[in-house]
Every structure is written in structure tokens, then in C-alpha cells.
Amino acid sequence: MSLIPETTWARAGAIFRLAVPVMLTRLGILMFATIDTLMLGRLSAEELAYFAISVPPQVTVITVSYGLFSSTLVLIAQARGAGRLEEIGHVFKIASMMALVLSIAVAWLLMPGEAVLLLLGQSPDIARGGGRTLDTFVIGLPALLLAAVASTLLEAMGRPRVVLNCVIAGLVIKLGLNWWLIEEHGAAGANLATSVVRWLMYAAMLGYVMLTPEIARLGLYTRIRRKKQISVDILKLGLPSAISQGLESSAFGAMTVFAGWLGAHAVASYQIALNLVSMAFMMAMGLSTATSVHVGMAYGARKRSAAESAGWLGTAMVAFYTVLMGVAFILFDHQIARLYANDPALVATATIAIMIAAFILLPDGVQAVLMGALRGFGDVNLPSVMHLVSFWVVTVPLAYHLTFTRAWGTDGLLWGLVAGLACASFLLGGRFWAVSRRLLT
């Protein structure tokens, strides 16, 4: 049976079947932070602020690393589509070695966390509490990056449910650890629980990969061939994607830093809105991953019209989903805010933030899927420049202007994000149209 669906409906069905477990996996991963946000918000605004202010460095590291190793997803999908099966295991092993080295280097840069946050202009109190939280994140960093590589292998090979099962089991363990560690250590305890679970999840995924014959025989136990070329391909595709993801996540992080300048309640309400946006975005990333896999397989098999169709189908599907989510945000903004906080003042500011966040969802999801589709073609350089323009020429300056010059407060941060993400969606949409037209001629 062909790996490449022949009709539009079959292609849409294949994307959806891969996307759903990946969506649930991404949602499950974000639920770690959601659980922490809910529990810490009910503990105190200060502990939630410590957690929130530690998030930008964490998210930047995570998204840059996932951007770098998204190249393994594309290379595995292309090798699978072209029938070069032994190369799959070689890509996995080289990417795993890179992940380990990168995690050690980044961990060294992030410690001590208090010094990092002080450099970002935070007050001594917030930097102290946030720094302890960042330090406990570093403990699980190697497992996080190694698991990212293992999960891309499983998803590219059509085994996303394995990753999903590991995440579900991890959430159950995380809940138990949180009740114990948050009471004693606050935000730092929440991150320590996550770090422990990340090591357990990686061990489970690696065990499955090594012990499943259908995967293990794909070059997992053979000597690596074309080591230099594969390493170059990973970096050639991955570095622009890492830069692109870093530009986006650092822009979101800059918003958190700005919110920190406004005070604990401002950063707490922004964290609530950001957590909800991130939850919707992680589900959109499921469609991005599925779209990237199907574009990559079709391109590897030289079925370029199927690759173009997969890109636009993924975009249409994410648009439908994010519009529905946005409507839900607007209809239930106050009720959602009350789930996150008991403080009436925090509930009031969070309600407004959630309403504005509804308008972020559509452009955020669309640009993510279009970036995934372009990655499937191996087109990553110009899209990274487009992210630079969207996030650091449009988003950050506009958000700063609205927040501080126009005195819109947290609302200004969120409207700045709406504008930057809309810019990214239009630019990437035009790029995908141009690339698919060129490759089809």
C-alpha cells in the first residue's frame, strides 16, 4: 500500500489520523504547565509570578531545541518516502548525540537561574523565586531534548500513540508529585516534579524504540553511514527552524518580561492568557507535525502535487479548529479565569486578557502549520527571515509601544502578538504558494 494518499479526502483523513494523537500529545505536554499554573495560582499570586517569570528561558530553550530537531522529522519522513529505511536509524542516533551535547551546554548557561533573571531586569524578589524554579527545570533538560528526538522518530514512523501513552502516564505521576512538592517548595517544587517525570518518559520511549523490531531494524544497530552528510542535513534544515522558533518564543518571552515590569498581578494574568494560547497552539502543532510529515513523504516520493495539497489541507484544518477555540474563549472568558485564580483583582484582569487572547489563536495556528508545510519541502531559510520581521520588527516594538507609551498595560502585549502573528501568517502563506508553484513546474 502506498504511503502517499492519492485523493484529497484520503489525504485529509491521513493528516487527521496522524494529527489527533500528536495534538493530544502536545496538549498533554502543555498540561504539565497548566497543572502548575492552576495549582500555583490558587496557592498565591507570588508563586505563580515566580513560575511565570521562569517560563521565558524555558520556552525559548524548548522551542529552539524542538525547531532544531524538527529536521529529524523531515529527514525521516523523506527517507521513508524514498525507501531509504536504514537511514532512519542513523538520523535518530546522530540527532540523539546532538541533543545530549546541546542539553549539557544550555544547562551550563542557565545556571544559576537567579543571575539570568536579574540580567533580564527583574526585581530581586521575583528573580530569587523564579531563579530557584529555573534551576529545577535544568535537572530535566537532557531528558527533555532526548525525548524530543525519540518522539519525532515515533511520530514520523506513524507511532504517535506511543508518545501519547507516555505523556498520559507522565501526567498521572506529575499530579501525585505536585501535591507533595508544591506544598513544600512552591514553584520550584512544581518544576522539580516535571523534571523527574521527563526522565521517566524518555526512558519509556527509548525502551520502546530499542525493543520494537520494526523500528530497531531501521539502522538502529548498524554502523552509521554518511555520518557527516546526515549531521550537515540535520543542521542545515534544523538551524533555520531553531532560529525561527527562537524568534517566536523569545518574542513571547519578551512579553512576559514586559509584564514583569508591570508587577506580579500583571505577569500572573499574562501567564494565564499565555497558558491558554499555548494550550491551543500545542494542539495546532499536532496538525503542523502531521502536515510536515505528509508534505515531506510526498516530496521524497516526488509526488509534488500531493505535497502542495497536504500543505493547504493542514492550513484549512487548523483555521477551522482555532476559530472554534477562539469563540469558546470569548464566550467563557470569566469562567475560565476563575479556574485559574481566587483573587478577584486577578480574575478581572485575566478575564480581559483571555478575551484578547482569542484573537491570537487563528494567526498563531495558521503560521505554525504553514511553517511545518514549508519545512516538509526543506524550505527553511526565508521563512526564518519572515519570522524575524513578524516578531522582532512588528510584535515586540508594537507591544512595547501599546503597553508603555499608550499605557494599555497587559492588553497592549496581547494586541502586539495578534499583529505580529497575522503578519507571519500572510508572509508564510505567500511563501508556501510560491514554493509549491515553483516545485510543481
Image (tube, rainbow, N blue to C red):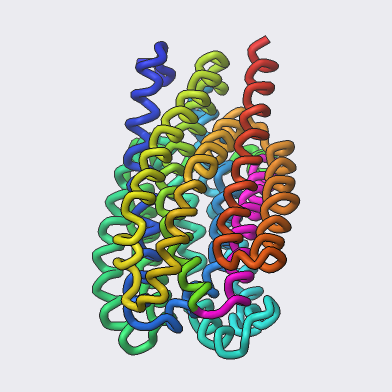
**In front here: 260 or 54?**
260
Q: Is residue 400 left or right of residue 114?
A: right
- Seen as rendered, the residue at the extreme top is 441
Q: Residue at x 63, y 81 (%)?
A: 122
Q: Position of residue 152 (x, y in %)?
A: 46, 44
Q: Residue at x 71, y 50 (%)?
A: 394
Looking at the image, residue 4 lies above or below residue 143: above
Residue 396 vs 258, above or below: the answer is above
Q: Is residue 234 above or below residue 145?
A: above
Asked whether, in this view, residue 22 is left or right of residue 144, the answer is: left
| Residue 92 magenta-highlighted | no
Tell me the quarter of the image containing the C terminus.
top right
Residue 19 is situated, as x and y percent measured from the top left of the image, at: 38, 36
User: On the image, which quarter does residue 384 sit in?
Assistant: top right
Q: Main secondary structure of the magenta part?
A: helix
Say how many tags the image has: 0
> Looking at the picture, how far across and down is residue 121, in whole percent?
68, 79
Q: Is residue 97 visible?
A: no
Nearest the eye: 356 or 315: 356
Residue at position x 37%, y 64% from top? 34
Q: Is residue 88 above or below residue 100?
A: above
Q: Which residues are magenta?
A: 235-264
Q: Is residue 238 visible to us here?
A: yes
Quadrant of image for the N terminus? top left
Q: Indicate whether residue 255 is drawn in magenta.
A: yes
Q: Residue at x 40, y 58 (%)?
A: 30
